Amino acid sequence: MKSGTAVHTKELSKTDPRVKLIAAKMKKENYKPDALIEILHTAQNAYGYLPKEVLAYITKALHLPPSRVYSTVTFYHFFSLKSKGEHTCLVCTGTACYVKGAQAILNEIEKKLGLKAGQVSADDKLGVQVARCIGACGLAPAVVLDDEVQAKVSPDEIIKKINIKIGTV
Amino acid sequence: MNTIPVIINDKKLDVDPGKTILEVCRENDIEMLTMCHLKGVMDIGACRLCLVEVEGANKLMSACTTRVNANMIVRTATDKIKRYQRITTELFFAERNHVCSVCVANGKCELQQLGYKVELDHIRYPHLFPQCEVDTSHPWYVMDHNRCIMCTRCVRVCTEVEGAHNWDVMNRGHQVRIISDFNTPWGESITCTSCGKCLHACPTGAIWPKAIVQGQLEKKPEMLSELMEKRKMKL
Ligand code: SF4
Ligand code: SF4
Ligand code: FES
Ligand code: FES
């Protein structure tokens, strides 16, 4: 009768540095339900939005009712449940990535694709977002294309990969 | 226990301290209009129907969330209060899509009764006619958001009495909606135990059992209050 598919969606990848970042934050906060907003902030900063499976992960770890978490997320305007665009390019602009050239990547994306951070292409194919440290500083500059972390990428490489994703090559 | 004196509608009453103005009024047969209040669960002062004038206070107070003080002077039926109650009732009807003639709760609905009490004959505000979902995914119950007045009685009963916390509220402003889990279809909720308490808590035809025909709905909110009373006795 109860399939529960809607709350228990797909599993998060254990190797995604962003998952580790959230796990560390929850541990630091002692899994206190009171720390929900701060933990959601960490997640939103790492993903650029709050994917359903990330919410499910946090909900379970903090032993909170799903509706309580959803209520909090939809109450505050700074949380977002949707990534913009069919594909997302999330450029980390945390300190390490910034130092290693995140800005050059953003500049190249703007030059070649005409998209600034926070914008979506007119055909809704690609959304460009920035994150504050995704927890992969050793791989700086890091970019997450859809769900794959791209380590130590050059502006040229990332444009090529994006073009493959959105099918313009 | 020592009692304290309060004056309600010019009548002096000796009451137990710690009670809310609403409790005192109900115990003394002073008619009070309420919608979000449900005896046994926490009061949140959301519907603004139980507003009263308290001398010395610079705004109207919700009787369900205000406790009595010694020598408090309260008025429950002034013209101002009646005007507010009428506005509040009109807004309930204007905010969603209430069509009593086709509603399962017709004749048994607390909102409809409220309309009679404030002598509602027409609505002065533009109807919003929002697009609302009807969630029929649960095997036994239906949730029709067209008829929901956001009193959150279902939320509190499910959380405080059943302990399931299936329901909560999402968004704000005109976009507010009652949700189960992650805005999941009710039938796919992983928290709902299908106990049916929310159905009895709901004052309107928003939550109803499938095995019912139009106008045949019988809700028993007082059953939930009794249940909570009995639980307290056991402690
Ligand atoms: S049926 Fe019971 S458990 Fe399910 S939502 Fe209603 S009150 Fe909660
Ligand atoms: S569904 Fe019923 S009980 Fe729940 S908030 Fe709406 S009107 Fe109130
Ligand atoms: S600064 Fe980019 S991963 Fe830490
Ligand atoms: S009953 Fe007091 S505000 Fe609703």
Image (spheres, coloured by chain):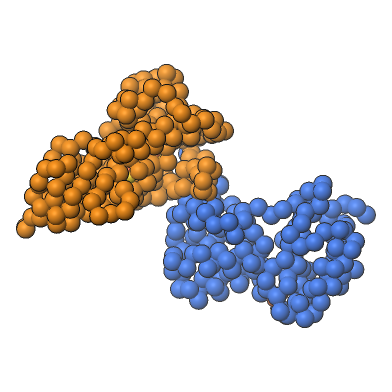
Chain colours: A blue, B orange
Q: Nearer the viewer, residue B46 or B156?
A: B46
Q: Nearer the viewer, residue A26 or A13?
A: A26
Name the residue located 73 percent from the left edge and 72 percent from the top edge. A93
- Quadrant (top left/top right/bottom left/bottom right) for the N terminus of chain B: bottom left
A157 with respect to A80 (left or right): right
B172 with respect to B80 (left or right): right
Q: Is residue A157 above or below residue A81?
A: below
Name the residue located 17 percent from the left edge and 53 percent from the top edge. B72
**Residue A140 pos. (x, y %):** 76, 77
Q: Is residue B227 above or below residue A127?
A: above
Name the residue located 74 percent from the left edge and 59 percent from the top edge. A118
**Residue B36 pos. (x, y %):** 34, 42
**Residue B205 pos. (x, y %):** 40, 29
Name the residue located 57 percent from the left edge and 33 percent from the top edge. B131
Q: Is residue B228 above or below residue A102?
A: above
A38 with respect to B42 (left or right): right
- Quadrant (top left/top right/bottom left/bottom right) for the C terminus of chain B: bottom left
User: Does the image show residue A52?
Assistant: yes
User: Does the image show residue B201?
Assistant: no
Q: Residue extending furthest right?
A: A169
| Quarter location, residue A139 | bottom right
Q: Is residue B99 above or below residue B224?
A: above
Q: Nearer the viewer, residue A20 or B21?
A: B21
Q: How many marks?
A: 0
Q: Nearer the viewer, residue A12 or B215?
A: B215
Q: Residue extending furthest left?
A: B1
**Residue B94 pos. (x, y %):** 47, 31
